[in-house]
Amino acid sequence: MSAISGARTTGPANAKPWILENKGEGRFDVRRAAFTADLVEAEMRGIFDHSWLYVGHESEIPNSGDFVTRTVAGRPLVLVRSSDGMIRVLQNSCSHRGAEVCRERRGNSRLFVCPYHAWTFQNDGQLRGTSFPDGVSKGFDRKRMGLKTPPRTEIYRDLVFVSFDRDIVDLQTYLGRAKDYLDQILDQGESGTEIVEGTHEYSIDANWKLLIENSIDGYHAPSTHQRYFDYLKRNSGSIDRGPQRYSRGMDLGNGHALMTGEATFPRPVALWASMLGDEAQPELDRVMKRLVERFGPDRADRIATHSRNLFIFPNLIINDVQAITVRTFFPIRPDRMSVISWALAPRNEPEGLRKVRLDSYLSFLGPGGFATPDDIELLESCQRGFANREAEWSDLSRGMSDAEPDMLSEEQMRAFWRRWDHMMRDDGAPASTVAGERI
């Protein structure tokens, strides 16, 4: 019985282990075949089909009839605010013969019309009409021929999730300890949060699990992103906090993980540095005052002056450092993934702070930023290096001996791998073959 979804069969006992963990020896190894074997179908069935998956944000569809189309775990979906004002997720597949009924990326419509045979659906999914209706059979039941929906849809603070597992626990139970850190991010918006218009989509020629490791890996930052740190120093964009009193790499349970610590970068919440300009400081002081009034000084300080890289299993990263980046990704092949990211911001944010936020988003995690091209190059380099099959294991043992692992540890990555390994075996995922060798 899984801790977060219904009972499933047990995996093959003779399969070689994906991970080796020995806490006494301080050893945690991951078999590199997990990045090269053709596990996409098994991962879709064993992990993505039994998790809560992020679809979008309510702010993307503010008006009745607004919709956006997304592909989630290989399934084309429509996130729509129907004419009755309800947020719905519809499966983008005609109930007649399966064609996609919505072929636009976004828009506003009361109806979705299938281009194949002109079946017409209301934006709540109900079948409105068929072409040549006189020819339908006596057994035709209009009520059961509406667009299907994922088995579960839930919304938490404007974030829309779906699950294809009807028996999965509710979303807040699934989030568990991660919920408080998610709240620290969302509480930055006194009137809520919104997705800033614009989407960043790209692909990486590397296994999707490498981007999870990278996104919650503080150890790589000083070496991989040295150019960015030099840029901040030249432009007075770093903050000297002295020795960090608070730095954690955390396993939050259910596969969720976190890096958090005192921010060393200016934040358009309430942490000023000279690169933001003198005009920003009074506004940041006002924001901090309101945070204290709302939450008290301790939580306000945590919200405003601490950074968070929050991972929600299996594929949602919310990077709350200089700005807030929401990013999801899915496997295409063992050596290729699709990625989509957005900038999240407080609603009604002053124009000057919004500009700072978007500049920070673009300069670090944007398509031409300091971080994303560096990370992509290194992830693809790892994938190429895995061709050396004789080097069988990757080491993720850093910080295992620490009572409270810091952000440079790899505890947060171990959290993902423990859950991934459990779910792959719990679902009966078959042993795979790499170059003819059973693993």
Image (spheres, helix red, strand yellow):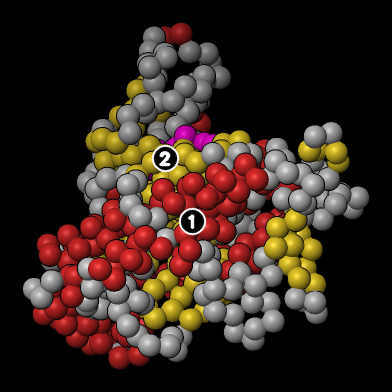
Badge 1 crowding class, 10 Å Cα cut-off, few under 14, some 14 to 19, many 20 or more, is many
The amino acid sitting under disc 1 is Leu
Q: Amino acid at mark 2?
A: Tyr
Q: Residue at x 54, y 79 (%)?
A: 406
- Front-most of 261 and 122? 261
Question: Dot 2: what SS?
Answer: strand
Left or right: 425, with 273 as reference point: right
Instruction: Indicate the position of residue 287 as horizontal and vertical percent values.
Output: 19, 78
Q: In the image, is 158 to the left or to the right of 17?
A: left
Q: From the image, which quarter does the N terminus lie in? A: bottom right
Instruction: Confirm whether the magenta stretch covers residue 46.
Output: no
Q: Residue at x 30, y 91 (%)?
A: 297
Q: Which residue is mark 2?
A: 202
User: Dot 2 surroundings within 10 Å: few (below 14), some, or many (20 or more)?
Assistant: few
Write down the region rendered in magenta: 73-80
**Distance (Cα) linking label 2 and label 1:** 16 Å
Is residue 254 something one can see in this rendering? no
